Image (cartoon, helix red, strand yellow):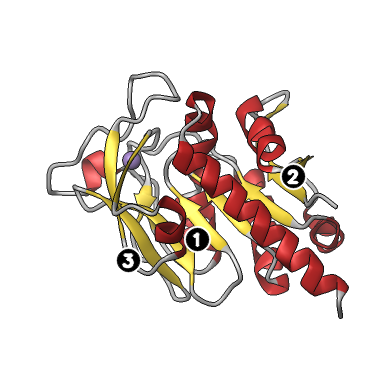
Amino acid sequence: MKPIIGITSNLDSTAHTLQNTYIQAVITGGGIPFVIPTGVESDVQQITALIDGLIVSGGGDMNPVLFNEEPVPQLGNVTPERDSNELKLVTHMLEADKPILGICRGHQVLNVALGGTLYQDINSQIASPVLQHDQKAKREHPSHAIHIEKGTILESITTSEKIMVNSFHHQALKEIPSPLIVSGKSSDGIVEAVESTDHHFVVGVQWHPEALLQNEDQVSMRLFEAYMKACVERMVAVESY
Ligand code: MN
């Protein structure tokens, strides 16, 4: 049995969208992709029961109201209905202890769902010099390095203290609540990866491994494989009750 992986999607004015790279990453990793639209908040309990894992995908900015802040001028597009839909999905998946992989915006959603806060715009809100985190190169190009914390799930996947990642964000994690811990940082101190110490597999990454996979990036391949493996382990655990 393959795990069924829910992937959240973006909502623009007329359409739900999701980059094909997410779908391909799940198929390549050994799962069945299942796209979740915005607007299903009242049914998240049933959806959570259906899926074996959740990938919270990338997208626009989170509404700063969600972490008790007013918008700064540099805030980009927000989609409040997507925020609330994803926050509810993440909360239910955490309760069920089913694996979550948060990617870019999804990494930020994970942090906010647990009570954390964000920098609305790193370029204007962080005093120290900040790297280029909104790269101009193509999506599969790894542009900056990150340093991996020893003893983390991420380190067991990367098997390296330093990896190269792509970068398409101007927001970042600020306060990180327990049970999340920082598992990866860029050289300018931006939190590029987190994971839960209280769940089977709950990982957030600020970069886009599904895009790096287009170049057959080995760390990204292992990340999706480790995630699918965790989903299968939880499937077996739930079935054996
Ligand atoms: Mn970055």
| First reached walking from the N terminus: tag 2 or tag 3 | 2
Which residue is depicted at the point 46% across and 54% down?
A: 157
Question: What secondary structure is marked by label 3?
Answer: loop
Q: Residues within 10 Å of mark 1 (few under 14, many from 20)?
A: many
Q: As drawn, which residue projects farthest toward the bottom?
A: 241
- Residue lying farthest left? 128
Relative horizontal placement of residue 223, taking residue 85 as reference (left or right): left
| Three-letter code, disc 3 | Lys
Disc number for residue 112: 1
User: Residue 45 lies in what quarter of the image?
Assistant: bottom right
Residue depicted at 66% across the width and 42% down the height: 29
Please say if 18 is above or below 175: above
The residue carrying mark 3 is 150
Mark 3 vs mark 1: in front: 3
Residue 60 appears at what percent x and percent y?
51, 36
Q: Amino acid at mark 2?
A: Gly
User: What's under tag 1, amino acid-wise?
Assistant: Val
Q: Earlier in the sequence, mark 2 or mark 1?
A: 2
Residue 24 in the image: state x and y as whole percent.
Answer: 67, 30
Q: Secondary structure at mark 1?
A: helix
The alpha-carbon separation of the residues under discs 3 and 1 comes to 25 Å
Contact? badges 3 and 1 (CB < 8 Å): no
Q: Which mark is residue 31?
A: 2
